[in-house]
Image: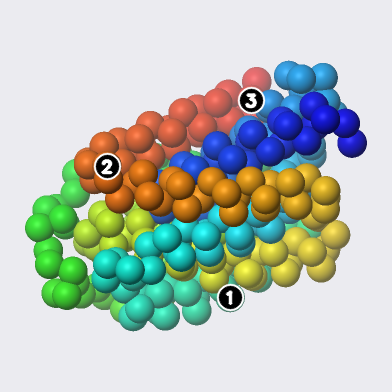
Amino acid sequence: MDITFIMVVFAIGFIGSFVSGMLGVGGSIIKYPMLLYIPPLFGLAAFTAHEVSGISAVQVLFASIAGVWAYRKGGYLNKQLIMYMGGAILIGSLIGSYGSSFLSEQAVNVVYGLLAVIAAIMMFIPKKKVDDIPLNEVTFHKPIAAILALIVGIASGIVGAAGGFLLVPIMLTVLHIPTRMTIATSLAVTFISSIGGSVGKLVTGQVDYWPAIIMIVASLLAAPLGAKAGKQMNTRILQVILALMIAGTAIKLWFDILM
């Protein structure tokens, strides 16, 4: 393991985790394609899709908890939403992460590509004036929240994501949760999801430990900085940034799968 490898993996982890903390996603939407495509550009061996999903799963565990810690004050964490979606997504992520060991490399990438397309479409759906709702008056449909979280957990467990990039548009467009509460709460649900994902990946031997450790260190440094930046940005800008990143990732991945 040379210095170039350490620097490249650390940079991927730092950038992905900064965006993770800022936008309320686990960061896998960014780190998955970065881990696939960037190391070979520096003459390093390419990670397989299973290795990428394993590294992402463990790293997201630490990135999300660091982001939640930064958002712990201010009333942005909706405990009821965390309980309903967190329990369902934990079950789903355990099922998906364990089942992913039986899938091919291509199948893992296809699942990721489908998730990215769905998330991108949802981010561009016009939002009802969710940010006009006072935080102490936020309500949501509990069965729908739990069912959607279970589905997200299964799919995201397969690719080693914690589902944050799907949870955010679901909370905004389906459950009508205000943006800042969505960002903070989705990080907490993402943390719960990543527990199931990490356990499934570790048990099935899909985690490359050294890159995962480097990414974890980068996460703990970058995620709180991203959360701090996110608190100071216009909520509409945050939504647009996330939508463009998800759309760009989906286009690139599907181009590679089809070509």
Question: Is the Cβ of the residue at disc 3 closer than 8 Å to that at disc 2?
Answer: no
Asked which secondary structure carries label 3, the reply is helix
C-alpha gap between disc 3 and disc 2: 34 Å
C-alpha gap between disc 2 and disc 1: 34 Å
Could you say which disc has been placed on residue 256 in the image? 3
Asked which secondary structure carries label 1, the reply is helix
Could you say which disc has been placed on residue 233 in the image? 2
Label 2 neighbourhood size at 10 Å, few (<14), some (14-19), many (20+)?
few
Asked which secondary structure carries label 2, the reply is loop
**Which one is in front, 107 or 203?**
203
- Of circles 2 and 1, the one toward us is 2
Question: Would you identify the image quadrant in which residue 73 lies?
Answer: bottom left
Question: Would you identify the image quadrant in which residue 145 lies?
Answer: bottom left
- Using residue 215 as the reference point, say whether residue 136 is left or right of it: left
Residue 173 seen anywhere in this rendered image of the structure: no
Could you say which disc has been placed on residue 180 in the image? none
- Tell me which label, 3 or 2, sits earlier in the chain: 2
C-alpha gap between disc 1 and disc 3: 31 Å
- Using residue 253 as the reference point, say whether residue 202 is left or right of it: right
- Tell me which label, 1 or 3, sits earlier in the chain: 1
Image quarter (top left, top right, bottom left or bottom right) of the C terminus:
top right
Give the residue drawn at x 55%, y 41%: 16
Kind of residue at badge 2: Met
Kind of residue at badge 3: Asp
Model colouring: rainbow
- Tell me which label, 2 or 1, sits earlier in the chain: 1
Give the residue drawn at x 12%, y 67%: 134
Q: Which residue is mark 1?
A: 91
Residue 9 seen anywhere in this rendered image of the structure: yes
Residue 218: x %, y % from top left = 63, 46
